[in-house]
Amino acid sequence: MNRIFSGVQPTGNLHLGNYLGAIRNWVLLQKEFECIYCVVDLHAITQEQDPKVLRAATREVAAGLIAAGIDPKRNILFNQSQVPAHAELAWVFNCVARLGWLNRMTQFKEKAGKNRENASVGLYDYPVLMAADILVHKATHVPVGEDQKQHLELTRDIAQAFNSQFGVSFFPLPEPQIFGEATRVMSLRDGTKKMSKSDASEYSRINMTDDADAIAQKIRKAKTDPEPLPSEPAGLETRPEAANLVGIYAALAGKTAIEVLAEHGGAQFSAFKQALVDLSVAVLGPIGAEMKRLTADPGYVDAVLRDGAERARASAAPVLREVYDIVGFLRP
Ligand code: TYM
């Protein structure tokens, strides 16, 4: 039986990259598989957070997942800090993972920036906690955007190292599921940079709560080049901004880039951008509205997370218990 696990950080706004690269795929997968989706608040504090803002963002992200179509009855939806087994398994994995492996993590280098000595130990250890998130539920598949690929490789390395150190075949080696036309959505201001919550420019990203006017403004201001759209994907190779907008359009329309270019090849950006505005508003408008409605009802969101956490604790407890046995800890 395939078991799906994935997570999203409650830092900043959910944006189109989160939606197209991950959340939309989570919604598709719930039809077929047992899915566990987590708002990773423990990961959020690897960089400084205002406690009030973190609490609000945790609820807002949970609301976003529900608004996007995740059914919290059918799946387990919870916030990480309510399930201590994640942090407990992370400790065991800290003693399995090697410094050399973590030193290779590109996301740490990006996030720590120039002042690496001043980064938190948690930020460095972040991928180990991520491995624990996945493996404490013995998940087999992990739907993520492309930027998480290296962390998934590390998860597999940790699972394998644990199995071999203790001579067991206990943990599965989870597979990343990176699919769709927008596995790496780029900034609207710079087609070579990932769309990200931490970009200083609001114009670099479309947030899931943006209204029609904001979406239209951001797309109209998006960087492009002076050429019309090509009629085949090969024509996008040296045009990162054009490629990004075509990828976004394709993902939102549920089409391939080939189909989009067959339709819009030869069009000027002014016309294509208008089509993209209309499509974005049609897809994101209802989700954003529902998200705002749910966010205004924190009692409901909290109840969903509480129920999810209870089921997540039940899923994680036997796995952690067995790990403790394998490692050689005395039972209470
Ligand atoms: P986070 O919160 O940065 O992003 C959540 C999901 O959105 C995807 N994503 C993107 N996809 C396409 N284009 C983009 N520009 C873009 N930006 C973000 C991410 O790939 C991710 O799938 N480390 C994870 C959270 C995490 C996790 C886990 C994920 C913690 N534990 C266990 C999977 C399994 C993160 O920071 O995601």
Image (spheres, rainbow, N blue to C red):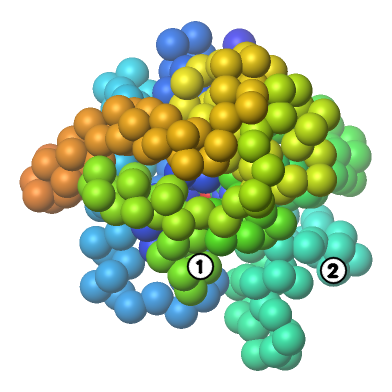
Q: Return the residue nearer the eye: 128 or 57.
A: 57
Q: Return the residue nearer the eye: 2 or 31.
A: 31
Residue for point 71% across, 70% down: 110
Q: Nearer the viewer, mark 2 or mark 1?
A: 1
Q: Is mark 2 within 8 Å of ligand 1?
A: no
The answer to whether residue 203 is above or below residue 118 is: above
Which mark is first along the chain, 1 or 2?
2
**Element type at mark 2:** helix
The answer to whether residue 129 is above or below residue 157 is: below
The answer to whether residue 253 is above or below residue 197 is: above
Q: Is residue 215 left or right of residue 270?
A: left
* Crowd rating for badge 2 (residues with CA inside 10 Å; few <14, some 14–19, many 20+): few
Residue for point 31% across, 41% down: 64
Contact (Cβ within 8 Å) of mark 2 with mark 1 = no
Query: Within the image, what quadrant is residue 173 found in?
Result: top right
Residue 163 pos. (x, y %): 83, 38
Query: Within the image, what quadrant is residue 104 found in?
Result: bottom right
Residue for point 56% across, 61% down: 189
Would residue 171 be visible to someone looking at this image? no
Q: Return the residue nearer the eye: 125 or 286.
A: 286
**Element type at mark 1:** loop
Residue for point 64% across, 37% down: 228
Type of amino acid under label 1: Ser
Q: Where is mark 1, residue-wise? A: 198
* Crowd rating for badge 1 (residues with CA inside 10 Å; few <14, some 14–19, many 20+): few
The answer to whether residue 238 is above or below residue 12 is: above
Q: Quadrant of the N terminus?
A: top right
Residue 187 pos. (x, y %): 57, 55
Residue 127 pos. (x, y %): 68, 57
Type of amino acid under label 2: Asn
Q: Where is mark 2, residue-wise? A: 103
